Amino acid sequence: MAKTAQIRTRKRGKTFSYIFEAGKLNGKRKVVEKGGFPTKSAALKAGLLAYADFLHGNIGIVSESISLADFMAQWLDKVVAANVKPSSMQTYLSHFKNHIAPHLGEVKVQELTPIMLDKWLRRLLQKGLAKNTLSVIYTLIHNALNYVVYPAQLISSNPIAAIKVPKNAPRNVVKRTIITPERFSALLEKYPFGTPFYIPLLLLYHTGMRLGETLGLSWSDIDFAKKKINL
């Protein structure tokens, strides 16, 4: 029986199998085994990929050295998207693309430090982002790095855990104004029925939804029978 790290191989008849432990279930060791490979090398290669997939939360990481951008792209796609509403997902993707990837995307997750992340947050503050927006971005990267710690097990602790959103971050950045019926009518004249903005404008004006919520709507969010929109 051959063994590399946590992966074992063994011959069963004329074919080979790979085996590795996957924790405990109801107090008993859970073992993953798959056979039918023509050679020991083929079994070991398949076992290494399967173990990496298991170890990293089934998000397809096969390398211990991965950039934050690559990790978060897979984490958002494989983990987050299945657990949040489309509108929230749209917000997360926007923050990732505009505020995380450009500044930290090329840094390897193992090389992220609290000082680096603190400077990044303060740089976003200097750009004029409101405290609520900073909090959403902070929570997004905090949760991603928690996943890097476990189940991915690429680092031993979360480097942003000790960092907080700056207390002097402004609560309101954009001055809110109420759109009058006359101004709204002028907008509809500029973007009449049939243009891409007509329906979003109606939804924004009559429901008070945020832009991200409106643009993230799908047919499943709308109950035509009850005339309701579920967010």
Image (cartoon, helix red, strand yellow):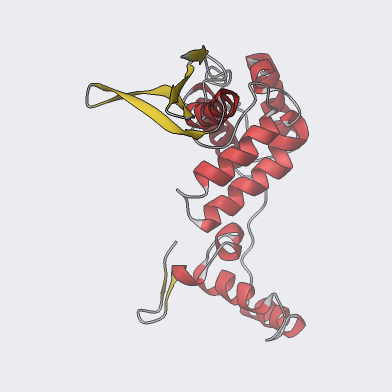
The residue furthest front is 14
The reply to whether residue 214 is in sight is yes
State the image quarter where residue 191 is shown: bottom right
Horizontal side of 14 relative to 75 (left or right) equals left
The residue shown at (63%, 21%) is 64
Horizontal side of 17 relative to 124 (left or right) equals left
Q: In this rendered view, identify the residue nearer to me: 161 or 44.
A: 44
State the image quarter where residue 182 is shown: bottom right
Q: In this rendered view, identify the residue nearer to me: 49 or 165.
A: 49
Coordinates of residue 23 in the picture (x, y in percent): 35, 22
Horizontal side of 231 relative to 172 (left or right) equals left
Q: In this rendered view, identify the residue nearer to me: 27 or 125.
A: 27
In the picture, the quarter occupied by the C terminus is bottom left
The reply to whether residue 170 is in sight is no
State the image quarter where residue 171 is shown: top right
Horizontal side of 17 relative to 181 (left or right) equals left
The residue shown at (71%, 26%) is 120
Total marks drawn?
0
Q: In this rendered view, identify the residue nearer to me: 153 or 172.
A: 153
The residue furthest left is 26
Coordinates of residue 101 in the picture (x, y in percent): 72, 36
Q: Is residue 50 above or below residue 208?
A: above
Q: Is residue 5 above or below residue 131?
A: above
The residue shown at (48%, 16%) is 6
Q: Is residue 53 above or below residue 85?
A: above
The residue shown at (40%, 79%) is 227
Coordinates of residue 79 in the picture (x, y in percent): 50, 42
Coordinates of residue 146 in the picture (x, y in percent): 50, 26
